[in-house]
Amino acid sequence: MPIDQTRGKFSKDGKQEKFERIYNSGEGDLVIWYKQGKKPDEKGFGRVLEGVRRARALLARSIQVLKNEPKGELATVVLRHHFGANDGPLSSEDLASIIESFELIQEGLRAQPTICLSKKLSDNTRGETNGADTDFHVHINLNILDDHPDALARTIIHEASHRFASTDGSVTSKRYGESDEDEKPEIYEYHSAYADKTTDEATMNADSYAWGALSLGSGRLLTSNTFRNDLGTTYLNE
Ligand SMILES: [Zn+2]
């Protein structure tokens, strides 16, 4: 049973501002923050809980596939599309480093993730994560996320990879015709440059892990096109 409690953050006039709901479970705890007057309905809580469960399940399955069948058909197509293995199989070092990152993300999401529904994100931002100076949390924008656990799971894995696998942008902006070579924005799956990223770039890129886990965990290659069609719904990509 979840526990609802206040979170000890007060406004100037002494009103309680933040609340949290805690789910304790065998597969890892989960904390959901929400704001005074903005308590989600049970369906909203349910969506977050299912999204986190699904993220954990996708990661577990992905690691299994990469460890047990790294040369199988599924791993081959997923590594090619999401991890830049365009010229045949990855080296064992590259494969080991990808598996290690998936394991770090998995560990982080088992520890005690906090999902925040209390921050107003811009209308086209699906999620955001905090810096490394506090406990890990992910801000999500339930309003624009597809009403499907996999959509939320993908956003959570993307954000968790920034924190636990140090993904922080990968492709020099020169590729996009920008002048600052040092700046390395992240490359999203729906960018055209995603198709020709190198494996080095992919291992530093959040969407590679998010879409990679979604694909490996679902047993088939998924992309922003096929995922949307599969669900029969539309949603924003960011
Ligand atoms: Zn990101």
Image (cartoon, helix red, strand yellow):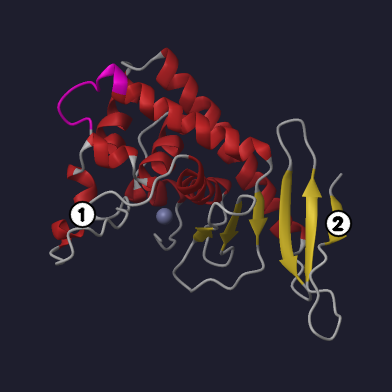
Image coordinates of residue 190 in percent, x first then y, are 29, 54
Image coordinates of residue 55 in percent, x first then y, are 56, 40
The image quadrant where one finds ligand 1 is bottom left
Image coordinates of residue 234 in percent, x first then y, are 43, 60
Q: Quadrant of the N terminus?
A: top right
Q: Residue at x 28, y 48 (%)?
A: 170
Q: Which mark is residue 3?
A: none
Q: Residue at x 61, y 50 (%)?
A: 136
Left-right relation of 52 to 2:
left
Query: What's the magenta region?
Result: 85-93
Q: Quadrant of the C terminus?
A: bottom left
Foreground: disc 2 or disc 1: 1
Earlier sequence position, callout 2 versus callout 1: 2
Q: What residue is disc 1 on?
A: 172
Q: Residue at x 23, y 51 (%)?
A: 171
Q: Would you call the spot at circle 2 few (<14 residues within 10 Å), some (14-19), or many (20 or more)?
A: some
Pick the front one: 43 or 172: 172
Q: Would you call the spot at circle 1 few (<14 residues within 10 Å), some (14-19), or many (20 or more)?
A: some
Alpha carbon separation for disc pair 2 and 1: 45 Å
Left-right relation of 238 to 136:
left
Q: What residue is disc 2 on?
A: 4
Pick the front one: 80 or 116: 116
Label 2: element kind: strand
User: Mostly what secondary structure, the magenta segment?
Assistant: loop
Decide whether residue 130 is among the magenta residues.
Answer: no
Q: Residue farthest to the bottom?
A: 13
Label 1: element kind: loop
Q: Residue at x 74, y 73 (%)?
A: 38
Q: Amino acid at mark 2?
A: Asp
Judge whether 76 appears above or below 82 on screen.
above
Q: Amino acid at mark 1?
A: Thr
